[in-house]
Amino acid sequence: QFGGSCNPVGGTGGFLQGGSHSLLSSWKGLGVDQVLEYDVVTEDGQRKIVSPCQNSDLFYALSGGVGGTYDVVVSVVLRIFRSPHIIGTLLSIEASNETLYVTLIRDLVRFLPKLADGDWTTAFIPSFYKAYKLALTPSDPTGYNMLLGSSLIPDTVVRNRQNDLIQLFLQMKRLSVKATSLLINHVAG
């Protein structure tokens, strides 16, 4: 996956300078880790090639050393890889029965280490869309509206603090105005 999940987030600027985490990050690292060279226009209007060997301080800044507000990125040279074979699933969890929801979340969290050992990447995306629909008047969307929150959950938490992770997901559901969807993405290559 290269580029942001929203159309205005381009690959050369917003995605790379905004963290560049994707479902494939566990395979080859962050997107910004693959940058070999930037072509930029500086604040004084100069065009510069920026790499680890040329304008290295600016390369560090553009590659996540500090916020990405220095220059306009015109183009980028990236390290590329052969496309892996990928299997993906998307689960949407909604349970009307609290006991079933607790059981499902508990069993799923306890299964996560096995997914990680099998080189699966798992992304949890809690959706607050139902709360959004209650708070705001409907519009005429051209796509699918969804308010999302996301977080990178370290492997050490998944393996060593499963009860805390279970409680986090349960607390998210309790804080919702109505039932909250928990979207789970899995990618294996």
Image: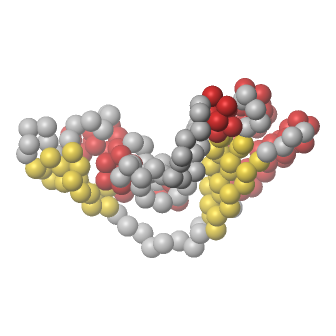
Out of 150 and 25, give the one closest to the viewer.
150
Tell me residue 171's x, y (percent): 75, 28
- For image coordinates 72% across by 42% down, the residue present is 181
Quarter-of-image position of residue 151: top right
Residue 17 at least partly seen: yes
Snapshot colouring: secondary structure
Q: Which of 183 and 132 lies nearest the eye of the viewer?
A: 132
Q: Is residue 39 left or right of residue 123?
A: left
Residue 50 visible, this orientation: no
Give the vertical position of 2 relative to 67 (above or below): below
| Image-based side of 62 in relation to 87, left or right | left
Residue 145, image x, y percentages: 57, 45
Question: Which quadrant of the figure contains the C terminus?
Answer: bottom right
| Rendered view: 54 above or below 42 | below
Residue 169 picture location, percent across and down: 74, 35
**Residue sitting at 32 percent across and 34 percent down?**
67
Q: Is residue 133 left or right of residue 9?
A: right
Residue occupying the point 36% across, 54% down: 11
In front: 181, or 150? 181
The residue drawn where x is 53% and y is 58% is 24
Q: Quadrant of residue 45?
A: top left
